[in-house]
């Protein structure tokens, strides 16, 4: 791909990227090397927040960027058609840009607010369009999805068309990377401040030190931690978050 200021460039993207996530630089380097990368992580690990950081970095650099969220695209037929049009237009007009796909496997979810009809429509219409762009290599591609454990425990339509489409989309990416959502000290402070705007800065800084001492500097931990319990019983606060996450990973979700 051509090397100019309006094309995704690893070195420039790293410089422009917010340093909240420690995995950020390695992911950017992987995009530059492989051209299409999908991040596999548990729900709540910060994947969507990270790709928003990447999108912001590209905007600073005037790199053409399109971000679509599958959970929004498959809700109604009009959204699906509009999304496909946007994808095709971006691929044809934005060579060397960055195409971001959030929740690549969402269309395969089985839940009371998601119908088989919508899933089939996405499998037959949206997925081929996405695969064509990923494999066409006119743009760089960054996607997010869930871990295999989550997928196996939380949905299966047992519909060959849907299941095969989900696998085909996943396999279209050059590489899949695990995403843990590990935060820097700056990132911890940022997330805690956003979640608890009423808490004084000195208290936020103290919470950051406690989480680092617990070796638990993840986005999920910072987002869900009970601030009061963290200071009185730090290990109990950590255990409560971990137990809640483990339960979500095991139990099927109805929605």
Image: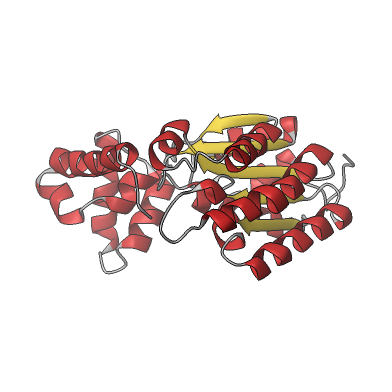
Residue 126, visible in the rendered structure: yes
The answer to whether residue 50 is visible is no
- At horizontal 57% and vertical 38% (from top left) the residue drawn is 163
Give the x, y percent position of residue 173: 68, 34
Report the quarter where the N terminus lies.
Answer: top right
Number of labelled discs? 0
Q: Name the quadrant containing residue 200.
A: bottom left
Q: How was the colour assigned to the protein in this rendering? A: secondary structure
Residue 70: x, y in percent? 59, 55
The quarter of the image holding the C terminus is bottom left
For this orientation, the residue located farthest to the left is: 232
Q: Is residue 153 above or below residue 121?
A: above
Camera-side residue of 222 and 110: 110
Q: Residue at x 33, y 52 (%)?
A: 223
Residue 143 sits above or below residue 114 on the image: above
> Residue 124 location in percent, x, y?
69, 49
Residue 238 x %, y %: 21, 41
The residue drawn where x is 88% and y is 57% is 93
Quarter of the image holding residue 149?
top left
Q: Is residue 160 left or right of residue 246?
A: right
Q: Is residue 137 above or below residue 93?
A: above
Q: Which one is in front, 72 or 252?
A: 252
User: Residue 190, located in which quarter of the rendered image?
Assistant: bottom left
Residue drawn at the location 37% of the way across and 62% of the way down: 194
């Amino acid at each position: 791909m051509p090397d100019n200021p309006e094309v995704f460039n690893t070195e420039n993207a790293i410089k422009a990227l917010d340093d909240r996530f420690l995995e950020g630089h390695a992911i950017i380097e992987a995009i530059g090397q492989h051209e299409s990368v999908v991040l596999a992580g548990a729900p709540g690990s910060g994947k969507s927040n990270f790709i928003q950081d990447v999108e912001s970095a590209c905007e600073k650099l005037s790199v053409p960027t399109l971000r679509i969220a599958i959970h929004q695209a498959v809700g109604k037929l009009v959204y699906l058609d509009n999304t496909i049009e946007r994808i095709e237009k971006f691929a044809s007009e934005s060579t060397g840009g960055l195409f971001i796909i959030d929740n690549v496997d969402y269309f395969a979810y089985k839940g009371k607010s998601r119908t088989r009809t919508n899933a089939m429509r996405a499998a037959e219409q949206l997925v081929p369009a996405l695969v064509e762009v990923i494999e066409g290599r006119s743009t760089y591609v960054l996607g997010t999805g869930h871990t295999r454990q989550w997928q196996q425990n939380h949905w299966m339509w047992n519909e060959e068309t849907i299941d095969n489409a989900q696998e085909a989309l996943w396999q279209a990416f050059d590489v899949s990377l695990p995403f843990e959502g590990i935060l820097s000290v700056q990132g911890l402070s940022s997330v805690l401040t956003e979640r608890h705007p009423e808490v004084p800065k000195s208290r936020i800084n103290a919470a950051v030190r406690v989480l680092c001492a617990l070796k638990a500097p993840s986005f999920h931990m910072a987002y869900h931690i009970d601030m009061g319990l963290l200071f009185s019983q730090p290990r109990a606060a950590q255990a409560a978050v971990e137990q809640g996450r483990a339960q979500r990973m095991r139990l099927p979700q109805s929605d």
